[in-house]
Image (tube, helix red, strand yellow):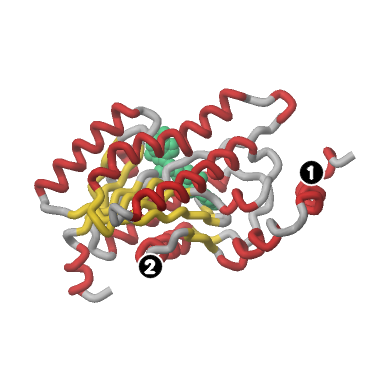
């Protein structure tokens, strides 16, 4: 990136939730490298403080009062440094699997929906009014939404809700000059996926994921999905009759 382009970005701000780890951390570092003023959000202040050149905003996305305070802090920074908020990327999230669907864990379900969806409502309430015209919101979903997966009742439902939220919000924000991208990654190597005990085909690095997201945000993509060879395969499979899909994806022991 040329010095003049970096200079042009220097009055542009981007807010990223979940910036203390994984995809969000890689995104924060890449936006800093491109000269943006990055507001890096998370609960872990120590990890956020290691992102050189970014401003940490420490808050829990599951606490609406903390989100309100963070928005006040952000407003102060934007005014003080005469910055334009160009992008808000709501990336923070968690993944928990329903290991015993017969004894369905309602509390787990609530936790995942709360962190991955409900929190977005409060973040939008507080951060949307601060986004400039021609700005863009990025909402983190997952390519898991293209097909049903076993044990993903909570995670998949939360991300499917994000897809609808993004599609609807896109229609309503167009007239206000704000774009909406939904982000659907395949497997990305992060602390979240390091916990998985199953095969994760075509997994990519967090750096590659961040590059794809930045490109999609920059070019105004409605849906940012990657790696393409993986996500197109899932999209193709999703066109099959549901009986075929169910047969393919039902865990072996449960088929009988
Ligand atoms: N990795 C993948 O393969 C993959 C694929 C599809 C979609 N995604 C999605 O991508 C997003 C990032 O995932 P990742 O893989 O980068 O995971 P990660 O390394 O575990 O990062 C999750 C981030 O979310 C933040 N977070 C979680 N709960 C929070 C809370 N209550 N309040 C504030 N921040 C919170 C964490 O920050 P603190 O701990 O500092 O609070 C952390 O920075 C998630 O939404 C995930 O569902 C990931």
Is residue 217 found left or right of 34 in the rendered image? right
Residue labelled 1 has its Cβ within 8 Å of some atom of ligand 1: no
Residue at point 48%, 38% (across, down)? 116
Residue 6, relative to residue 119: is it above or below? below
Does the image show residue 174?
yes
Which residue is denoted by mark 2 in the rendering? 219
For mark 1, give the secondary structure: loop
Q: Which circle, 2 or 1, is nearer the viewer?
A: 2
Does the image show residue 50?
no
Displayed quadrant of residue 64 = top left
Q: CA distance from mark 2 to mark 1?
A: 39 Å
Percent position of residue 250, x then y: 78, 45
* Residue neighbourhood size for the residue with mark 2, other residues' Cα within 10 Å, grouped as few (<14), some (14–19), many (≥20): few
In the picture, which quadrant includes the C terminus? top right
Which residue is denoted by mark 1 in the rendering? 251
In the picture, which quadrant includes the N terminus? bottom left
Residue at point 39%, 52% (across, down)? 138
Could you say which is closer to the camera, residue 164 or residue 245?
164
Residue at point 84%, 39% (across, down)? 253
Percent position of residue 255, x then y: 86, 41
Is residue 180 found left or right of 116 in the rendered image? left
Displayed quadrant of residue 232 = bottom right
Could you say which is closer to the camera, residue 122 or residue 107?
122
Residue labelled 2 has its Cβ within 8 Å of some atom of ligand 1: no
Could you say which is closer to the camera, residue 197 or residue 57?
57
């Amino acid at each position: 990136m040329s010095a003049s382009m970096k200079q042009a970005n220097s009055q542009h701000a981007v807010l990223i939730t979940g910036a203390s780890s994984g995809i969000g951390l890689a995104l924060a570092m890449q936006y800093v490298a491109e000269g943006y003023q990055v507001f890096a959000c998370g609960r872990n202040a120590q990890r956020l403080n290691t992102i050189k050149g970014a401003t940490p905003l420490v808050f829990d996305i599951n606490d609406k009062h903390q989100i309100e305070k963070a928005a006040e802090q952000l407003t102060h920074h934007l005014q003080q440094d005469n910055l334009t908020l160009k992008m808000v990327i709501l990336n923070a999230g968690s993944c928990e699997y329903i290991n015993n669907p017969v004894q369905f864990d309602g509390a787990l379900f609530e936790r995942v929906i709360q962190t991955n969806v409900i929190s977005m409502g409060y973040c939008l309430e507080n951060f949307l009014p601060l986004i400039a015209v021609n700005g863009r919101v990025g909402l983190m979903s997952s390519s898991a939404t293209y097909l049903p997966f076993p044990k993903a009742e909570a995670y998949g439902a939360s991300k499917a809700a994000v897809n609808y939220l993004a599609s609807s919000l896109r229609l309503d924000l167009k007239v206000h000059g704000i774009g909406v991208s939904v982000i659907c990654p395949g497997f990305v190597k992060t602390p979240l996926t390091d916990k998985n005990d199953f095969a994760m085909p075509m997994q990519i690095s967090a750096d590659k994921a961040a590059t794809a997201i930045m490109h999609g945000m920059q070019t105004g993509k409605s849906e940012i999905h990657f790696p393409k060879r993986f996500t197109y395969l899932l999209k193709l499979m999703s066109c099959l009759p549901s009986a075929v899909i169910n047969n393919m994806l039902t865990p072996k022991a449960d088929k009988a």
